[in-house]
Image: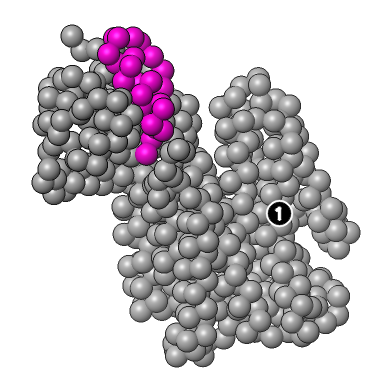
């Protein structure tokens, strides 16, 4: 008789459920809810990514130096498959991307949080409104969120078992990520720093493989930009423009703290005044970026206090700022509570960084927020990191959830005795009578005091008083004796389907003889057990 599988031990089933929930939710939002929103009147493609993709599809050309190429390429590919440029086809494709993102995130959470927390985190991502908010719009966020999740999954895979093949895969995804949005190029040095700090000399060869793989993808695009502009431009321009916008938004924030549109109008007025003072208009995007970069840096050098104000203000606008007051309030209501709920998870991840992988969820947050906040930050830029904050929120509150669940479970236990079914099964196995005695008496007769619990998810050795694995968060709680230590009884394992009847017979035989032993269930293993004499 094979052990029964726990409900959470069916990752493919949960992945399919998470995908289906988000896909249905995304399609409903795109085609049933979004058409009735007033936001439709502002257009689906305010940043011009859809237009760039359409030109690429219809003319086979992409001449822009102000946009990363992969999202327009995605738009062109969908147009090719749909037989023409159609907004509805792109929206439907983005719903599929969003659902696939949730599955990738679930896989990432299983590696960093453990099986059961991963289910809750994956379901939270599937139903979270911001996960589908940008699916009807032709912004980069849906595509970027998928690529970021795939990169983080391969990076965690590399960190857990460093190797050249894994490093190359992670490097390729880092290159794809950079070609999806310019600021994501920061993930290449960030990932290298994490890998080298974590593994030291053992990571030198994988780090080199990672860097070369990322360079192999980014370098051809950089060479293309060199041919077009004669300048070293890794991905695209707009760095100067965005830095200037960030300064302007900081200056004018007290005048319009809840309106991106008003802040941009005020800042562009300043820009036009700058051009007038210089008595010349920039000839192209590249020259405009140079002029605005110089002006923004000069402003920061002339007023160092502006740097501090900018960091404080943009640390706020990063979570809520949208087109107008109502959208800013809605964005803040959806994103700020999640960020606050994630704080316990942040603390817990940092506290257990040596024996847990949950800290890996901080990498995408640091990469996106670490570039956006000092340069230019508004609510849409936080969208790709919200899933990782949801994961940290689940991780941070998981011990409290487990404790509450145990209290509720104990409160509803009406039969403290061995159930007749379990007693009969044990009697059959041992070929002797097992009375339905009170649980305390059964524990005193047939139990082992546990010296250590070994989590079979990650192999981490835990002390005997834990309720979950310190490394991956897998529940490991066992019945507690009077001294607070964990005790293992054969009946507990039989009830949970942890051991087969043959394993239970062997276990009870060793209990009776007082042997130290090692036995493995499907969720955990026990090492060094002994009779509590």
Residue 14 vs residue 279: left or right?
left
Residue drawn at 63 percent across, 36 percent down: 158
Please report the bounds of the magenta region as a residue range.
497-519
- Would residue 331 appear left or right of 445 to someone viewing this image? right
Give the vertical position of 54 relative to 514 (above or below): below
Q: Crowdedness of circle 1 by 10 Å Cα count: few (<14), some, many (20+)?
A: many
Say left or right for 61 vs 313.
right
Residue occupying the point 59% across, 24% down: 199
Question: In the image, is residue 339 above or below residue 95?
Answer: above
Q: Residue at x 48, y 62 (%)?
A: 18
Residue drawn at (76%, 73%), measured in percent from left and top? 77
Image position, residue 380 (x, y; %): 49, 66
Question: 501 and 492: which one is in front?
Answer: 501
Quadrant housing the N terminus: top left
User: Is 127 contained in the magenta span?
Assistant: no
Q: Is residue 94 visible?
A: yes
Whether residue 229 is situated above or below residue 466 in the rendered picture: below
* Residue 506: quadrant of the picture: top left
- Number of numbered labels in the structure image: 1
The residue beneath circle 1 is 176
Q: Position of residue 99 (x, y in %)?
A: 55, 65
Residue 516: in magenta span: yes
Q: Position of residue 279 (x, y in %)?
A: 68, 73
- Between 159 and 512, the one nearer to me in the picture: 512
């Amino acid at each position: 008789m094979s052990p029964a599988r726990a409900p959470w031990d069916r990752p493919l089933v949960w992945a399919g459920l998470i995908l289906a929930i988000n896909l249905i939710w995304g399609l409903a939002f795109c085609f049933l809810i979004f058409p009735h929103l007033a936001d439709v009147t502002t257009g689906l493609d305010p940043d011009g990514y859809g237009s760039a993709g359409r030109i690429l599809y219809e003319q086979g050309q992409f001449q822009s130096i102000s946009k990363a190429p992969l999202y327009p390429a995605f738009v062109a590919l969908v147009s090719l498959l749909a037989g023409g440029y159609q907004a509805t086809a792109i929206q439907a494709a983005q719903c599929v991307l969003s659902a696939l993102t949730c599955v990738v995130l679930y896989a990432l959470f299983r590696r960093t949080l453990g099986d059961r927390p991963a289910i809750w985190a994956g379901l939270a991502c599937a139903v979270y409104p911001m996960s589908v908010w940008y699916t009807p719009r032709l912004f980069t966020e849906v595509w970027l969120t998928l690529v970021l999740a795939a990169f983080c999954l391969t990076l965690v895979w590399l960190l857990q078992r460093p190797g050249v093949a894994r490093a190359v895969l992670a490097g390729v995804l880092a290159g794809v990520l950079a070609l999806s949005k310019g600021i994501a190029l920061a993930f290449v040095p960030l990932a290298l720093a994490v890998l080298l700090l974590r593994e030291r000399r053992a990571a030198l060869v994988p780090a080199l493989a990672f860097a070369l793989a990322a360079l192999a993808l980014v370098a051809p695009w950089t060479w293309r930009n060199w041919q077009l502009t004669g300048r070293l431009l890794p991905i695209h321009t707009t760095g100067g423009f965005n830095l200037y916008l960030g300064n302007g938004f900081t200056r004018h924030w007290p005048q319009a703290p809840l309106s991106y549109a008003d802040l941009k109008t005020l800042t562009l007025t300043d820009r036009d005044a700058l051009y007038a003072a210089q008595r010349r208009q920039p000839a192209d995007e590249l020259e405009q970026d140079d002029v605005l970069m110089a002006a923004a840096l000069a402003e920061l050098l002339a007023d160092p206090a502006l740097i501090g104000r900018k960091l404080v203000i943009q640390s706020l606008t990063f979570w809520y700022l949208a087109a107008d007051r109502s959208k800013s309030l809605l964005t803040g209501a959806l994103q700020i509570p999640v960020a606050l709920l994630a704080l316990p998870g942040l603390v817990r991840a940092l506290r257990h960084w040596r024996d847990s992988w949950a800290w890996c969820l901080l990498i995408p947050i640091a990469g996106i927020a670490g570039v956006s906040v000092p340069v230019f930050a508004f609510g849409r830029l936080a969208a790709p990191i919200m899933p990782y904050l949801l994961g940290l929120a689940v991780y941070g509150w998981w011990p409290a959830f487990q404790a509450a669940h145990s209290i509720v479970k104990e409160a509803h236990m009406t039969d403290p005795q061995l159930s007749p079914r379990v007693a009969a099964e044990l009697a059959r196995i041992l070929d002797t009578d097992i009375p339905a005695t009170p649980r305390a008496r059964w524990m005193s007769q047939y139990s082992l005091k546990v010296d250590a619990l070994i989590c079979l998810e990650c192999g981490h050795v835990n002390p005997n008083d834990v309720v979950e694995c310190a490394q991956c968060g897998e529940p490991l709680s066992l019945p507690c004796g009077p001294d607070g230590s964990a005790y293992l009884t054969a009946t507990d394992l039989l009830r949970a389907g942890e051991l087969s009847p043959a394993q239970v017979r062997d276990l009870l035989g060793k209990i009776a003889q007082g042997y130290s032993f090692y036995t493995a269930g499907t969720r955990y293993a026990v090492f060094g057990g002994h009779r509590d004499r």
